[in-house]
Amino acid sequence: MGNYRTVVYDNTRVAVAKFVGHTEKEPTEALLKLSIYYKFLFRFCNTYSGNEKGHVERSVEFVRRKAFSRDCTFGSLNEANAYLDEMIDKLNSQTLSNCNKSPLELLNEEREYLLPDMPLYETATITDLRVNKYSTIMVDSCYYSVPDDYVGTIVRCKVYTTKILVFYNEKEIARHDKIYGMNLWHIDIPHYSKTLFKKPKALVNSTAFKQMDNTLKDIYSKYFKSNEKDFVRLIELVGIYGLISIDNAIKNLQELCPTDISIDKIEFICCRKDDPKIVYLADHNDEIMNNSLSMLNEFNSLLNI
């Protein structure tokens, strides 16, 4: 897309480190790094001069009114952001009355005057944290789980505004959506598979179970309610193959043998589904089988004469 050559900032704490005299402002280190990376110049609005930024605030009010005047209830922040992206795309595609062009068309005309595009700037805060005895780390007064293999170790965290990534020896071991509040817990149940395998009866009353995906809760209720140990093995498979693959494997078994759904069968379907050597009858087009069916149909026609 490209970057604008000059950006105007309001006098916010994230942009202004301190005021020097009545008119001069000292930028924050974060703003300096950002401007150097994208190679743009910046300046600040004058204090108590709302006329200098009225257009910006009016634009925000316009987008808020158009996007959220009807639908303002969402299940998550990601869902709200996705809805906002969709509405902005629609607004930017509408033709403006004063120039008979859409905002997207006007932006395309400006692209040749913009600075060269740069890779996305890394905005995460990086910190090293120790995993406590509950196999969690604390970020901004909230707790996030990591695999129970790493209890007592030091892990590196990249904290974004909406997500948290956890690494050990440069390998990603956990990923969470960021939560906001005090003493809240975000637990991913596959992180505790080894601990739960030793104490399977502790599963149902655990915080991890309460925060578990509803699809996984339904699977437990239907097939593993009296067999927590096998369900813990299923949780390990979820960590390897993903919940969608596990759910699809169970649906396949429901059609083939609904009274005998076992962990071994689920694992077999998940690990062999993409094997090119395996032939699935549903997808197989065999010439001998087709000829046999054709002959049976002919016999059936003769018998019905």
Image (cartoon, helix red, strand yellow):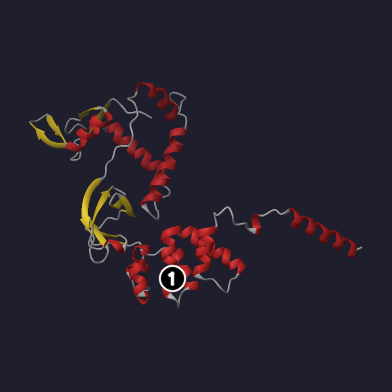
Which residue occupies the extreme left position in the image?
21
Res. 1 visible in picture: yes
Is residue 77 depicted above or below 116 in this figure? below
Mark 1 falls on what kind of element? Answer: helix
Q: Quadrant of the N terminus?
A: top left
Question: Residue 229: x percent and y percent?
Answer: 41, 74
Question: Residue 261 occupies which quadrant of the picture?
Answer: bottom right
Question: Residue 299: x percent and y percent?
Answer: 86, 62
Question: Residue 67 occupies which quadrant of the picture?
Answer: top left
For the residue pair 200 and 99, the one nearer the viewer reads as 200
Q: Residue at x 36, y 42 (%)?
A: 64
Which residue occupies the extreme right position in the image?
305
Q: Residue at x 21, y 52 (%)?
A: 128
Q: Residue at x 37, y 39 (%)?
A: 63
For the residue pair 45 and 290, the one nearer the viewer reads as 290
Question: Residue 37: x percent and y percent?
Answer: 26, 31
Q: Is residue 54 left or right of residue 20?
A: right
Question: Residue 213: x percent and y percent?
Answer: 42, 63
Q: Is residue 279 left or right of residue 75?
A: right
Q: Residue at x 27, y 64 (%)?
A: 135
Q: Is residue 213 left or right of residue 286?
A: left
Residue position for label 1 = 231
Res. 51 visible in picture: no
For the residue pair 283 and 88, the one nearer the viewer reads as 283
User: Residue type at mark 1?
Assistant: Phe
For the residue pair 257 and 211, the one nearer the viewer reads as 257
> Number of numbered discs present?
1
Q: Quadrant of the C terminus?
A: bottom right
